[in-house]
Amino acid sequence: MQPSIHTVVVDRKILDGFKRRALKYYPKEYAEQLWGTVEGGKANLCVIEPVDLSEQTRDGVDFDFDQRCGTKHSGMTLLGSIHTHSAPYDGTEPSDDDVSSSIHDKEIVWGICGIRKTAKRRFFSCRFWSPGRGEVELVVSE
């Protein structure tokens, strides 16, 4: 049985690393795996790890997990994935395909980051979900 997550905690440096890697692929969507620990209803993200992407377009990204979600390795658990939505679909609302994929892959927690670039600025927003609970609180530590 999967834990019911109500909060995701991630260090700003870890999230910034994902953002930096994702911006290299903009305007294509980009995805990575989430590794961490679960304590009570809190998911602590320790590593956001690149994966081999099988398909990457402006409208979607596909990849296969190297291991099943819930697998433990080196004291951490594979919790799920995080991917981007690029402009003009730069929102963080999940598509039907996003929800179906998270259920199929049995993700414990998963995130979407919206990215939009203008001539002078970059805009980056991020939200997380947990199956059965819906959107969960994001806490960024510094």
Image: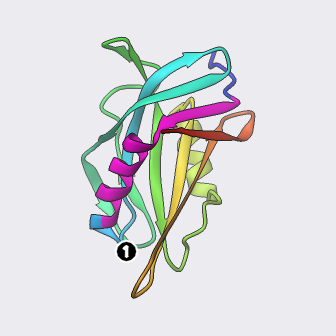
Residue at the top extreme, as displayed: 75
Residue 112 lies in the magenta stretch: no
Q: At 54% across and 30% down in the image, what residue appears? A: 106
The residue singled out by tag 1 in the image is 27
Point out residue 114 in the picture as x, y percentages from the top left corner: 52, 64
Which portion, as a residue range, is magenta? 6-23
Q: At 60% across and 67% down in the image, what residue appears? A: 91
Point out residue 49 in the picture as x, y percentages from the top left corner: 31, 38
Up/down of 94 relative to 75, above or below:
below
Residue at the bottom extreme, as displayed: 119
Up/down of 118 relative to 34, above or below:
below
Q: At 46% across and 59% down in the image, what residue appears? A: 84
What type of secondary structure mainly makes up the magenta span? Answer: helix
Q: At 40% across and 84% down in the image, what residue appears? A: 120
* Quadrant placement of the N terminus: top right
Task: Say which quarter of the image contains residue 4.
Answer: top right
Q: Does residue 98 appear left or right of residue 25 in this picture?
A: right
